[in-house]
């Protein structure tokens, strides 16, 4: 067969696969059960690139772990404890969000580190795990999160009770979180966060407020879910996709509200909570206060407000300065 004929057949095959993928997208918009081979990116990058958000990337562990680097100081972090935290970030936030997280709550995790595509430039923020084989893109957050939990459990340590995924504009009140976790059993498969209602029957935990898996839940994810792309298909929405994967093994978002029905995990600014359409909240919002005084996480906190917030919650005097008006500052 002549070379130009072989090239033409390759292109015909490519267009056939693209057509099948788009038909699948129309018929099954939320499932993505048809999986495009990741090798298409290598051979036809110009044609694939405009449609990249619809196609699942390879999650082959051997390929991805070859591109992982850990800063030297991470090897001195504890390998056991109550809580391992990883913060997903990007190079564009290295000068503002990352220093704020590093200077406040991350060091209060038993093992806390940043996951990114490029090393941090400041040696004062040394705890990094670098994923060179992932894209620094919103559309790769799903794969980045899957790998984050898999890598944390399999390659860092299986001996933490809880595994926390956060974004670089999250703030975690670590004493509230640890106090709450003390009331729960990490040997049960638990999925903690702010439960949202649309898309999935059992709901999903918003990625905005961060979410936490118990040791038992991560073990099931690693052993039964990660490698199965039917149980755990690609989803461009990382939080919805993660919830679908866990639901395939019967792991649904837990009710994390306090005894007064107020929310510990907060995916929106406090002033925005009531502006979100009611259909997005799994639990009906109450009149009056919505956020627990024992809140665990806040979202969309600017670097300056994060530093200010931390100085209020953890003053050098050791005296907590919390008041009901506290959230008006955010």
Image (cartoon, rainbow, N blue to C red):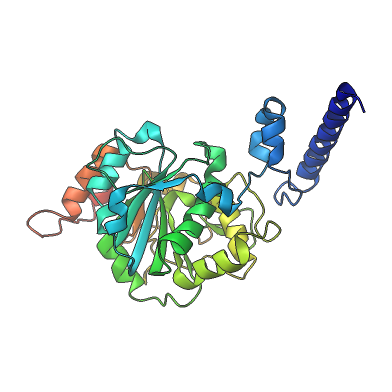
User: Where 272 sits versus 76, above or below?
Assistant: above
The residue lying at 79 percent from left, 35 percent from top is 18
In the rendered structure, the answer to whether residue 289 lies left or right of residue 253 reads: left
In the rendered structure, the answer to whether residue 119 lies left or right of residue 3 reads: left
Choose top left, top right, bottom left or bottom right for residue 203.
Answer: bottom right
Which percent across, then down, holds residue 272?
41, 44
Which percent across, then down, holds residue 312?
17, 51
Query: Does any portion of residue 173 appear in the rendered image?
Result: no
Choose top left, top right, bottom left or bottom right for residue 244.
Answer: bottom right
Which quarter of the figure is the N terminus placed in?
A: top right
Q: Nearer the viewer, residue 71 or 262?
A: 71
List the single residue furthest toward the left: 317
User: Where 186 sits versus 282, above or below?
Assistant: below
Q: Nearer the viewer, residue 99 or 79?
A: 79
Query: Does any portion of residue 178 appear in the rendered image?
Result: yes
Q: Nearer the viewer, residue 57 or 235?
A: 57
The residue lying at 68 percent from left, 56 percent from top is 229
The residue lying at 10 percent from left, 60 percent from top is 318
User: Where 267 sits versus 253, above or below?
Assistant: above
Choose top left, top right, bottom left or bottom right for residue 76.
Answer: bottom left
């Amino acid at each position: 067969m002549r070379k130009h004929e072989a090239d033409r057949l390759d292109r015909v095959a490519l267009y056939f696969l693209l057509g099948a993928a788009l038909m699948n997208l129309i018929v099954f918009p939320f499932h993505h059960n048809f999986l495009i081979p990741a090798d298409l990116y290598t051979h036809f990058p110009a044609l694939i690139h405009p449609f990249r958000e619809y196609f699942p990337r390879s999650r082959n562990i051997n390929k991805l772990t070859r591109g992982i680097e850990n800063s030297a100081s991470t090897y001195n972090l504890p390998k056991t404890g109550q809580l391992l935290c990883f913060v997903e970030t990007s190079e564009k936030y290295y000068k503002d969000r990352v220093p704020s997280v590093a200077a406040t709550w991350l060091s209060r995790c038993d093992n806390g580190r940043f996951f990114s595509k490029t090393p941090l430039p400041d040696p004062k923020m040394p705890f990094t795990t670098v994923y060179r084989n992932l894209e620094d893109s919103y559309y790769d957050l799903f794969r980045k999160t899957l790998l984050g939990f898999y890598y944390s459990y399999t390659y860092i340590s299986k001996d933490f009770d809880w595994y926390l995924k956060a974004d670089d504009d999250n703030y975690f009140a670590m004493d509230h979180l640890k106090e709450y976790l003390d009331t729960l059993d990490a040997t049960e498969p638990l999925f903690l966060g702010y439960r949202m209602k649309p898309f999935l029957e059992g709901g999903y935990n918003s990625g905005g407020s961060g979410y936490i898996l118990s040791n038992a839940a991560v073990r099931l994810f690693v052993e039964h879910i990660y490698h199965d792309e039917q149980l755990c298909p690609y989803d461009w929405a990382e939080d919805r996709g993660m919830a679908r994967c866990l639901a395939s093994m019967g792991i649904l978002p837990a009710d994390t509200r306090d005894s007064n029905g107020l929310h510990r995990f907060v995916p929106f600014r406090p002033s925005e909570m009531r502006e979100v359409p009611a259909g997005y909240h799994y639990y009906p919002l109450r009149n009056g206060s919505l956020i627990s005084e024992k809140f665990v996480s806040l979202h969309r906190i600017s670097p300056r407000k994060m530093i200010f917030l931390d100085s209020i919650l953890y003053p050098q005097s050791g005296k907590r300065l919390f008041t009901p008006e506290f959230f008006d500052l955010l």
